[in-house]
Image (cartoon, grey):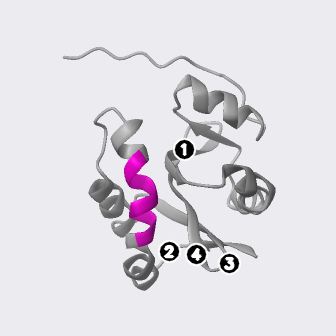
């Protein structure tokens, strides 16, 4: 059985963050480019600047996602900051439709994520499309 748990109280964050952090750590280490550390994600959630959702599979955390909202003048976008864990295919079937429903009820028009090309290909199966190329330059 799969269910989604939103770590939306200090108590839930304290109880479930260690498991979420262990799922997110490989992503931060391997895919992020120095934008944040796992501890920073916790601090954002604790400050109410980001939210954490955990997919439980038979009571065990299998997937963790940290996200925030971007309020453009004409759209509200949910930005996936980090997504980590296993069973993305299982999440696509059970977690994703539930999360999409919640996002829509929350006033979200679109969901965005900054991803490497391999993850972009995976996310196409969930209805994402390539929109922008991100460029950076050190200052």
Query: Where does label 4 land, which residue?
Result: 60
2 or 3: tag closer to the N-terminus: 2
Q: Which mark sits nearer the N-terminus, 2 or 1?
A: 2
Residue at 41% over, 82% down? 15
Q: Label 1's element?
A: strand
Q: Residue at x 61, y 43 (%)?
A: 77
Q: Which residue is mark 1?
A: 79
Q: Which residues are magenta?
A: 19-26
The x and y percentages for residue 10 are 39, 80
The earlier-in-sequence mark between 1 and 3 is 3
Mark 4 → mark 1, Cα distance in angstroms: 25 Å
Across and down, in percent, residue 54 comes to: 56, 67
Q: Position of residue 81 (x, y in %)?
A: 47, 46
Name the residue rendered at 76%, 41% in the picture: 126
Find out whether residue 111 is within the magenta segment.
no
Disc 3, disc 4: CB below 8 Å?
yes
């Amino acid at each position: 059985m799969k269910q989604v748990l939103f770590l939306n109280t200090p108590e839930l964050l304290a109880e479930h963050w260690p498991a979420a952090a262990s799922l997110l750590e490989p992503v931060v280490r391997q895919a992020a480019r120095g934008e944040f550390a796992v501890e920073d994600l916790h601090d954002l959630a604790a400050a109410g600047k980001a939210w954490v959702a955990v997919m439980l599979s038979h009571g065990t955390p299998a997937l963790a996602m940290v996200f925030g909202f971007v309020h453009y003048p004409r759209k509200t976008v949910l930005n996936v900051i980090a997504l980590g864990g296993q069973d993305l295919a299982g999440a696509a079937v059970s977690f994703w439709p539930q999360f999409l429903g919640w996002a829509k009820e929350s006033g979200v028009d679109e969901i965005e994520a900054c991803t490497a090309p391999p993850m972009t290909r995976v996310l196409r199966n969930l209805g994402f499309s390539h929109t922008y190329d991100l460029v950076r330059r050190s200052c």
